[in-house]
Amino acid sequence: MVSLIEFRAETRAWLESNCPASMRTRMLPGEDVNGGSRRRSTNAESYLWLERMAEKGWTVPAWPVAYGGAGLGKAEFLVLLEELQRLNARPPLVGMGVSMIGPTLLEYGNDEQKLRHLPRIARGEVAWCQGYSEPGAGSDLASLRTRADDQGDHYLVNGSKIWTSGAQHADWIFCLVRTNPDVPKHEGISFLLFPMDAPGVTVKPICLINGDSPFCQIFFDNVRVPKADLVHKENHGWAVAKRLLQHERSGLLALASADTMGPLERIRPSLPLPELARHYGGGRRIDDPMLRADLIGNEMTKRAFLLTQQRAVEESEANTPGATTSIFKLVEAEYVKAQLELQMRMRGTQGLGWTDAGFTEEEIAMTRLWLESKSISIAGGSNEIQLNIIAKRVLGLPD
């Protein structure tokens, strides 16, 4: 058996030889790989890095070898994370396949579903989206009304989902549907998988105030879903849905890269915050004691967050902790918003650019990301929902 010291040495040597130079730099918009072929990375080396890491099983290192992973134990997994961070390596593959539905299928999927979907996810061959929120079911997700009517060997799905990230680029969707309207709302929900090009699926992007359309509304009109694509048991989808959200909120996939704070990889400017202060303040703003204190506090929060994530992995029986992931989601949302506010303070009026007149591309991009950041404490479960989960499931407080 290879010792951890040997594993670290072998891992470091392999990464040094195989991680392309551009994959050791800050991720630029459009260069990430989310799987599938509908949205391609603008950097060709992204696919070389993906191919090499997938061959090692390191796109999903803790997954079993049979499903495209490397079968790493917890100690080896943490060593790999440290070595990737040492190189400032980008994640070879991101998206809902590796961070959400893949880990969930490992726990709740049957053998056929695992063999059908997991290797393709690990190789980056398919992109996924999430069919949870509806126009009338957001924070109260269990009140969803999209229904799946039993037709013997298949379901017919009718309804609508909204705020579906990346639906226009996705190949498959994991979707919550109501299969029994006559029982308490949490007990009549099922968890289905189906392709986005299935007859009856219509996708309409939603334009946001920052000018982008990362979210969509999806309409289902008699979509035929075989019962083989039901995950777990009929009317028991709520348990699957909650576990998937824990995988999403843990942010643990972000540890396997230079992106040590989840969404921060896409919102960081080209200059670190202290250098921004020097650049926009001519050397004066960085001497402002209040700004300096806020910068230090922001950096301390980031480091404490990362260490807490790593400790949670070490202490948990599974690779993803349980209800404590709501703490990660809550802290990360507030951190991201605070970091964007700091950038605005340092940029001054240059932080309000909307067109190219008098503003750099980065300044314009950061203005739009500052606006987008306001949604982070809502998307993926609002802060209020996370506080309720923490109170009930972590602290054990009474209702």
Image (cartoon, rainbow, N blue to C red):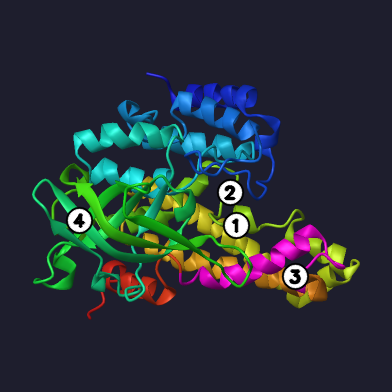
Q: Mark 3 or 4, which is nearer the eye?
A: 4
**Earlier-in-chain disc, 4 versus 1:** 4
Which quadrant holds the C terminus? bottom left
Q: Amino acid at mark 4?
A: Leu
Q: Residue furthest bottom?
A: 399
Residue span colored magenta? 352-378
Tags 3 and 1 touching, CB below 8 Å: no
Residue 377 located within the stretch drawn in magenta? yes
- Residue drawn at point x = 9 percent, y = 72 percent: 182
Residue 208 sits in which quadrant? bottom right
Q: CA distance from mark 3 to mark 1?
A: 21 Å
Q: Can you identify the residue that label 1 sits on? A: 264
Q: Can you identify the residue that label 3 sits on? A: 354
Residue 297, can we see it?
no
Q: CA distance from mark 4 to mark 1?
A: 40 Å
Q: Mark 3 or 1, which is nearer the eye?
A: 3
| SS type, badge 4 | strand
Q: Amino acid at mark 3?
A: Trp
Q: Mark 3 or 2, which is nearer the eye?
A: 3
Q: Residue furthest right?
A: 282
User: Which numbered circle lies on residue 259?
Assistant: 2
Q: Amino acid at mark 1?
A: Leu
Percent position (x, y) of residue 126? 42, 39
**Earlier-in-chain disc, 2 versus 4:** 4
Q: CA distance from mark 3 to mark 4?
A: 45 Å
Q: Is residue 19 left or right of residue 108?
A: right
- Residue drawn at point x = 70 percent, y = 64 percent: 366
**Earlier-in-chain disc, 3 versus 4:** 4
Q: CA distance from mark 3 to mark 2?
A: 27 Å
